[in-house]
Each structure stands twice: as C-alpha cells, then as structure tokens.
Amino acid sequence: MIDLYYAPTPNGWKAAIMLEETGLEYRLILMRLGEGDQFAPGFLNISPNAKMPAIVDHAPGEGWGADPVTVFESGAILIYLADKTGRFAPTETDLRGRKALMEWLFWQVGNQGPMGGQLSHFRNYAPENERAYGFKRYLGEYDRNLGVLEARLEGRDYILGDYSIADMMAFPWAFIAKPLGASLNDFPKVSDWRARIKARPAVQRAIDLYKSEQNGGRHRVDNNDILFSQSSASFKPKPDGGSA
Ligand SMILES: N[C@@H](CCC(=O)N[C@@H](CS)C(=O)NCC(=O)O)C(=O)O
C-alpha cells in the first residue's frame, strides 16, 4: 500500500496520474495547504521541503529492506514508481532513452513547473498593486516553455515518443494554461498532446480527485500568510506542537 500526500494542484496531479495509470493500490491523504498541514512534524519527516506531493511505500519490495520508503519531489516519485512497476519510462539498459527522460524531467521541475507556479502566484494571489511586473515576467517564461515543448513535439506524439512519466510531469502545467492567463493558440502540437493525455481515463480520474477542494484555483484570502509569507521561521515548532 502506498500513502499519497496530495492536494488537487498540478504538482499533486502528477503523482496521482502515475498511481492511476499503474493501478498501484494507494491511499490518499488530503493536505490542507492553506491550513499549514505541510509544516506538521510528521509530514516534514517525509517531505523536508514542506511541499506535496510525497509518498510512503509500505511494501517497497526486493532490495529496499523492511522499512517503508518515503519519497518527496514529484520527479523523484515518478521515477521511483516507474522503477517499481517497470512502466512508463525507458529502462536502465536504454541509455539514450534514459538520458532523454532525465533531461525532460529536470526541464519540467526546473523550468515549466516553477515558472507556472510563479505565474499562478502573480495572477491569482499577489496584491493588485504589486502584480504587473511579476505577471509579465512569468507569463513570458511560461510561454517560453510552451515554445520549448512545441518544438520537442515536432514529429512526436509524446515527449519521448511513447507516453511516459515525462508527459505526466508536464501535462498538468499545460492543462491549466487558460486559468493562468495564457493561451495554447500558438502551440498546436502542445494543444493536441494535451488533448490526447486529457482523454486518458487514468488522467481523468486523477484530476477529478478532491476537485471540490480546488476552490476555483484560489486559496482563501485568510490563508495567504501560511502559503505566501514563508521563511525559515515557518519550520519552527509552535508551543502547541505544530509549526509556526
Ligand atoms: N518541486 C516540487 C514542487 C511541489 C510544490 O510546489 N507543491 C506545492 C503545491 S503545488 C505545495 O506543496 N505548496 C505548499 C507550500 O508552498 O507551502 C515538486 O515537483 O514536487
């Protein structure tokens, strides 16, 4: 059994999509990020960066020893699950395929994901009078990454040719282009790729998980400090046993 620490956001969907695609048995633990669940000491032992998704595999299998395995960071989670199941990734013997997989996973977690995340912040949450510069900057970066993906999809149905965890990583951030204030009109290949992935039943099931919690893409205004005014002090335990 695998515990999935999850909230219905693009990064949460990545892990949910892979679990749904593989059919692995999992239990979903909903994270109330606006209420600070990510700073609970028990969760920090699993995910020291205080972010979901994270998983705990209680039956990791041969070679892992008896203790449960914890994994944080979506890319690491998807590689772990691909290795566990032997699915949706080139194997270690396909050296060129594996290299390409790593490139596109690192591209996603270092570029498309964070730029999309900052774009979302400036579009949805930043104070009106401080919005303009950040919005312009990250809309440009998000658009730049769409261009990178468009070029990669030339002559390919999926990022590596076959559907893989590289697509599961990048799809959620392209899926929400419109609510981010961006458009896919100039990116026909990304648009078709997004439609192909969205049509997969496993992907549908994953993005529907706890849809009611998505709150129109906005967190409650009174949660802004927990989510948007973080510092190293956020990790300090509170006297009542929680975190600051
Ligand atoms: N690089 C991380 C990003 C994860 C991430 O940013 N998660 C967000 C939600 S989308 C989160 O947990 N935010 C809680 C917070 O910032 O306090 C990954 O790919 O797993």
Image: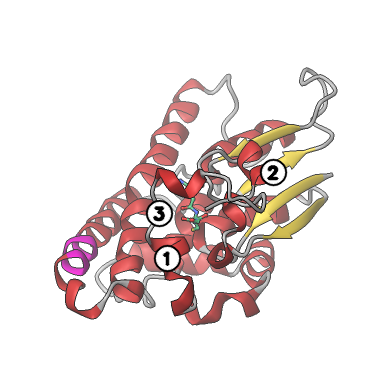
- Identify the element where label 1 is drawn: helix
Position in image of residue 62 (x %, y %): 82, 21
Q: CA distance from mark 3 to mark 2?
A: 19 Å
How many marks on residues?
3
* Pointer 2 local density, CA inside 10 Å: few below 14, some 14–19, many at least 20: few
Work out whether residue 135 or residue 84 is closer to the camera in this orientation and state it.
135
Circles 3 and 2 in contact, beta carbons < 8 Å: no
Q: Which residues are magenta?
A: 134-140
The answer to whether residue 218 of the structure is visible from this angle is no
Position in image of residue 40 (x %, y %): 63, 50
Dot 1 corresponds to which residue? Answer: 225
The answer to whether residue 229 of the structure is visible from this angle is yes
Q: Which residue does the image show at 18% across and 78% down from the upper left? A: 129
Q: Which mark is residue 42?
A: 2
The amino acid type found where label 1 is placed reads: Asp
Work out whether residue 93 or residue 170 is closer to the camera in this orientation and state it.
170
The amino acid type found where label 3 is placed reads: Gln
Dot 3 corresponds to which residue? Answer: 230
Q: Is mark 3 within 8 Å of ligand 1?
A: yes
